[in-house]
Image (spheres, grey):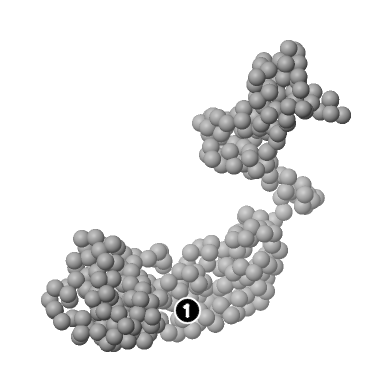
Amino acid sequence: MKSLKTQPAISEIFRRSELFENVAKVLKRTPESIIDESLEYLAGKADVLPQTIIDYIQKTELEELGENANVTAFSVISETDTSFSSERSIRELCGVNMREAEASKAMKQIEEELSCPIRGTIFKDPFTCSSGHTFERAAIERHLQVSGKKCPISRMKITNHILPNYALRNVLEKFVEKYEHQRGDIWEQIVEACLEYKNFSEQLNEPEDVIVPESDSDESDSEREIREQERDRNQTRRTADQIRDFMNTHFANLNIMYADDIPEIVEQSDNSSYANAIRHYMIRYNEGGRTAEQIRAYMTNQGYDDYHIQDIPEFIAQSRDSSYRHANEEQNRRYN
């Protein structure tokens, strides 16, 4: 099946339909109630001047299309028919063909309600996992077997037990029954999606326990979580922003004041991982040769006041190990 991403022609249908709906709001009416009524009649009902609606449509067209607004139905009608405000319906002025509008809504329903979040194509065998989210059966099975027991949408832990979504199947069957026999270019993708669902013959009607291979049957959940965290920390190609967010979230005690350039340094290195960023932070934390001014600024940024800092910066600066780590240890020693 072709990609369900909206084609330019469909985008233009959406645009016109949205304009039509916005005009209905200006008139304080529902779109269904103004389909074939004249602009002059509706303007009178809404107690606004026809020119107000005309100006609104023209302004919107110009803002959305620029010079291309000159070829819209509204511009063509306004140039060729000076009395269009009293004779034309708003649907005509907005260039809305109700058949096109229905096709655009059907396409939107496929994309937003009837497509698998993993595959992006129309459901053929929808199954719901324990998180409550629904996916194409083959897609969620593959996810469980390869990516682990976490919901692709909520990321919450899920079981390998999945259930057929009969309610969604009913919606799909009614959708297919309504649109599978439509003809014309604007219906091509919709009919193709309907036939994909209708011709699928491998639907499963029973709940299923997906076979999920275990990498280590003796490994506990906590051990598995630690292993996943370690793998995440060692993954490379992290950006500077990702590294900075990670350090601020997971290692807030590592003062970023003295290492603000580390995310950029690590990003440009051969090993742009969180683990490498942590190593850089710890090297600077343990590095000696700090001056009293640097240590005082570091401790102040850590939240210590003058009462707690006392003479520690000068004391550490004159010692053999004049590092930020040693300053923290000395402060803790005195406190205890």
| Amino acid type, label 1 | Lys
**Between residues 334 and 194, which one lies in front from this camera angle?**
334
Quarter of the image containing the C terminus?
Answer: top right
Horizontally, residue 51 falls left or right of residue 192, namely: left
Horizontally, residue 81 falls left or right of residue 56, namely: left
**Rendered view: 299 above or below 184:** above
Q: Position of residue 177 (x, y in %)?
A: 45, 85
**Rendered view: 177 above or below 160:** below
**Between residues 20 and 117, which one lies in front from this camera angle?**
20
Residue drawn at point x = 30 percent, y = 80 percent: 48
Horizontally, residue 17 falls left or right of residue 321, namely: left
Residue drawn at point x = 33 percent, y = 72 percent: 19
Mark 1, secondary structure of its residue: helix
Which image quarter: residue 165? Answer: bottom right
Q: Which residue is mark 1?
A: 198
Q: Position of residue 47 (x, y in %)?
A: 32, 83
Residue drawn at point x = 59 percent, y = 36 percent: 273
Q: Farthest right residue?
A: 336
Residue 13 visible (yes or no)? no
Which image quarter: residue 212? Answer: bottom right
